[in-house]
Image (spheres, rainbow, N blue to C red):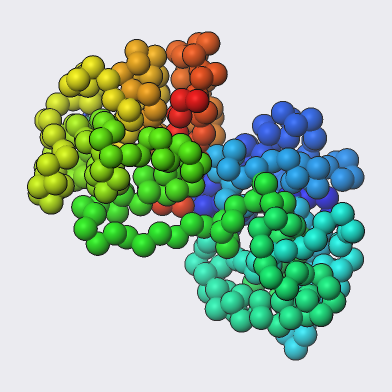
Amino acid sequence: MNSLLVYCRPGYEADTANELTALSTQFEVYGYPEFKSEQGYILFHFYQPGDADRLGGRLAVSETIFPRQIVVVTAHLEGLDKTNRAGPVLDAISQADTDEWKNTLLFVEHADTEDGKALAKFCKKFIVPLRQGLRKQNALTFKERNDGRGLHVFFTDYDNCYVGHSYPDCRSPFVNGICRLKFPPRAPSRSTLKLEEAILNMLDEEERSTIFREGARAVDLGACPGGWTYQLVIREMSVEAIDNGAIDDHLMATGLVDHYTADGFTYKPKYGRVDLLVCDMIERPDRVAVLMSEWLDKGWADHAIFNLKLPMKKRYDTVATALGEIHARLGKKASDYRIKVRHLYHDRDEVTVTAIKA
Ligand SMILES: C[S@@+](CC[C@H](N)C(=O)[O-])C[C@H]1O[C@@H](n2cnc3c(N)ncnc32)[C@H](O)[C@@H]1O
């Protein structure tokens, strides 16, 4: 096969396909998507032999918006015999092996759909004999580590799977491309997980330590009941929390939060500037994009992390337009920022944007 298998949130197949089409044009490798809606993945087939592997080795999941994982497909196995599913998978892996890369990780995965989740137990069981078989035929390092090729076996049901691989600088490190986080019991809302996932997965270690430090100041627009403010406060930042709603009492008791009942679109930082602006207001994405650009452009905030709520259709176009707006408003200053957009696991019909000043 000469295709990429791209996992996404069910319902986001068309958006993922649009993004892959745009990216393939950008990388000058051409192909077309294939998907059914709500299946939780797409295939992207290429015309030129070798192009799937070429793009799969250059396109980092972390730099994309909707993909959760990107796998270079080497085989599609159909009608597996349930008395020996591992045999054909082992054969497919050894046929696609090259001397150039060591296989250092193994993933047995499924889509994030109801049908897919029903395969979770089976996948966890299947990985054990498969791992042993691979080690026996010298196709997987004994100690699994992140610096080599990752092998992926993606079951679409008990009898059918795709086999393929991912590259260390490009793949998501998570099984099924999903970063699961435990809900912190003292956080006032589940929204807290969106910001936590962004902090953990969209920023690097240096960015985390420079921005999230004791004494740093933040503004949280649309803060209530306080899930995002909670993430800032546990990192010992002082927060101006802006919202007409009620904020969690425990957060106020920390002494690190000032709550202002004001409109997020007209609020200005109390002391002239802050280190970080965060915003989770339910508002039109173009309005939020303009507001965020203004704060960065005026120097009211050094960095920004915000969510853009998405419409039901043309979500890739909506994100692209919002990003275009941000770049246009920042002009030359845009190159001072590392801007990333991700549809995170804990996001629903929204994406998270990080704009971090170099
Ligand atoms: C999704 S909730 C935010 C949840 C919050 N991030 C958390 O983790 O708890 C959206 C909030 O935005 C607030 N909001 C919407 N429009 C606003 C505006 N123009 N100014 C201030 N707050 C606004 C709403 O009152 C609501 O509390």
Q: Position of residue 345 (x, y in %)?
A: 46, 52
Q: Position of residue 110 (x, y in %)?
A: 60, 66
The residue shown at (75%, 88%) is 83
Residue 292 or residue 142, whichever sits in front: 142
**In which quadrant is the N terminus drawn?**
bottom right
Q: Position of residue 50 (x, y in %)?
A: 87, 45
Left or right side of 155 for 202: left
Vertical order, 148 against 261 (above or below) = below
Res 45 visible? no
Q: Where is residue 14 in the image (x, y as percent from the top left)?
A: 59, 43
Residue 96 or residue 131, whichever sits in front: 131
The residue shown at (21%, 35%) is 239
Farthest bottom residue?
83
Residue 212 or residue 325, whichever sits in front: 212
Ligand 1 falls in quadrant: top left
The residue shown at (51%, 19%) is 336
Vertical order, 263 against 172 (above or below) = above
Res 84 visible? yes
